[in-house]
């Protein structure tokens, strides 16, 4: 595929650069720069779905070490609206987050409307989960929405298919994703929305590889998306019900097909064990609501695995949840106090649990990066798996099925 000169990524990404500093096996340590600062990779992005990470202030999230957060274009489009965010100074000013922001296109949320959405080659038609009103996302509108929000990194509109779909459905969605990627690229770099042209000039647009669990489709999708000179590339359509081994195998395949000098982003993945494995396969960026969502349900990460703070065994533990943890919750409160807060349904319990889980994940990523730079990532990976016991596969699958069912998937 040949793109016009005005679509040359070297001309369109002056505000975004990526430098790979070191490799240790498949793992990579690098840095990308944006108009709102630089980010050290590999990185985990906490999810600020509606311009907030639930229960936490921006200062608290920054103090935890978050370098970049993710906002959701679907939710912000519906409420308070893209024009409203723009009038109020853009997403950074609106949510008082001075560091980089990535927004997704909103496509996954629109697709998750199930019976309330219709997809064709031109657009997604869906009904708002708020008031039932009807809306349309086209590739061009998805880009315009994100230009209006003013994030540093924005995403193409793509079609994500639930795990287990028939091959013909997956292949149709892949081709649609490819057409939309080309349209998104031209809409952003060739003819940005006039009202948001100043924002657009500073934004980097990432393409997304689809293809489900079919290796030949993933090959074709990676080849096509990589032929478009995006500043970065994402792997979509995973963590939607497939086994961990399938997810890891597909991730490995796709990263080997993507340009080595561009960042790779594995979308929607945030379990500790998946972060370690994703990095081993060459992934640079991750996001997921999981750390904060499970925290609000009392599931807390420790070096040996996830625990349920509502378990009776914590009621008498007159010591921190985890010795050696330096998060605010563990430095100031006992596990017994956290147990009490959750039993009493106090909001402080949700806040402290969220602080703990984000601290755990962000420190994990820091440890991974340092291990890569010191050429000891494999020993770090081995020690992690020797110690950390993830949720068992059967439980994980039940959780995933409930998660998909709640979203019409």
Image (spheres, rainbow, N blue to C red):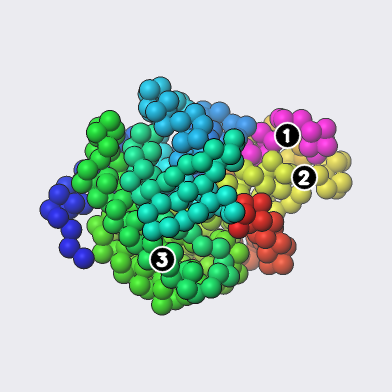
**Does the residue at mark 1 contact the one at mark 2 (Cβ under 8 Å)?**
yes
- Locate the C terminus by quadrant: bottom right
Tell which circle, 3 or 1, labels the residue nearer the N-terminal end: 3
Q: Is 150 above or below relative to 171?
A: above
- The number of numbered discs placed on residues in the rendered structure image is 3
Question: Which element is circle 1 on?
Answer: helix
The disc label shown at residue 349, or none? 1
- Judged left or right of residue 386, residue 367 is left
Question: Which element is circle 2 on?
Answer: loop
Question: For residue 54, what is the image quadrant?
Answer: top right
Q: Residue at x 51, y 31 (%)?
A: 79
Tell which circle, 1 or 2, labels the residue nearer the N-terminal end: 2
Q: Residue at x 28, y 56 (%)?
A: 182
* Local crowd size for mark 1, using a 10 Å CA cut-off: few (<14), some (14–19), many (≥20): many
The disc label shown at residue 174, or none? 3
* Local crowd size for mark 3, using a 10 Å CA cut-off: few (<14), some (14–19), many (≥20): many
Span colored in magenta: 339-357
**Does the residue at mark 3 contact the one at mark 1 (Cβ under 8 Å)?**
no
Residue 208 pos. (x, y %): 39, 58
Question: Which element is circle 3 on?
Answer: helix
Residue 354: in magenta span: yes
Residue in the foreground of this view, choosing between 303 and 115: 115
Residue 5 pos. (x, y %): 12, 53
Q: Main secondary structure of the magenta part?
A: helix
In the orientation shown, which residue stands out farthest toward the left? 5
Residue 238 pos. (x, y %): 52, 62
Q: Which residue is mark 2?
A: 309
């Amino acid at each position: 595929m040949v793109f016009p000169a005005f679509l040359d990524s070297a001309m369109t990404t002056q505000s975004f650069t990526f430098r790979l500093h070191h490799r240790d096996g498949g793992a990579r340590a690098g840095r990308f720069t944006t108009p709102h600062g630089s980010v050290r990779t590999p990185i985990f992005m906490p999810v600020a779905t509606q311009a907030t990470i639930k229960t936490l202030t921006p200062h608290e999230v920054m103090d935890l070490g978050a370098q970049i957060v993710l906002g959701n274009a679907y939710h912000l489009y519906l409420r308070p609206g893209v024009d409203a965010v723009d009038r109020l100074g853009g997403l950074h000013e609106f949510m008082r987050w001075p560091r980089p922001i990535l927004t997704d296109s909103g496509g996954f949320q629109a697709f998750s409307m199930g019976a309330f959405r219709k997809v064709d080659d031109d657009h997604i038609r869906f009904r708002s989960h708020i008031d039932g009103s009807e809306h349309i996302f086209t590739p061009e509108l998805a880009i315009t929405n994100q230009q209006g929000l003013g994030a540093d990194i924005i995403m193409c509109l793509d079609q994500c298919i639930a795990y287990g779909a028939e091959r013909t459905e997956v292949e149709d969605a892949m081709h649609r994703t490819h057409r939309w990627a080309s349209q998104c690229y031209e809409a952003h770099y060739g003819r940005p929305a006039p009202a948001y042209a100043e924002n657009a000039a500073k934004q980097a647009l990432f393409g997304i590889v689809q293809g489900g669990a079919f290796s030949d489709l993933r090959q074709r999708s990676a080849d096509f998306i990589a032929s478009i000179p995006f500043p970065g590339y994402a792997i979509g359509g995973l963590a939607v019900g497939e086994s961990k081994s399938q997810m890891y195998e597909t991730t490995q395949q796709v990263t080997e097909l993507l340009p080595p000098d561009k960042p790779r982003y594995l979308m929607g993945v945030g379990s500790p064990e998946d972060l370690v494995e994703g990095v081993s396969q060459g992934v640079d960026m991750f996001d997921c609501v999981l750390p904060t969502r499970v925290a609000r349900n009392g599931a807390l990460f420790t070096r040996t695995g996830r625990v349920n703070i509502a378990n009776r065994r914590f009621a008498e533990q007159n010591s921190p949840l985890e010795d050696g943890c330096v998060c605010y919750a563990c430095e100031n409160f006992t596990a017994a106090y956290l147990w009490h807060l959750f039993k009493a349904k106090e909001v402080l319990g949700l806040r402290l649990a969220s602080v703990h889980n984000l601290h755990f994940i962000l420190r994990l990523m820091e440890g991974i990066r340092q291990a890569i730079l010191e050429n000891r990532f494999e020993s770090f990976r081995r020690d992690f798996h020797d110690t950390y016991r993830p949720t068992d596969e059967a439980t994980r699958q039940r959780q995933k099925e409930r998660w998909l069912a709640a979203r019409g998937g």
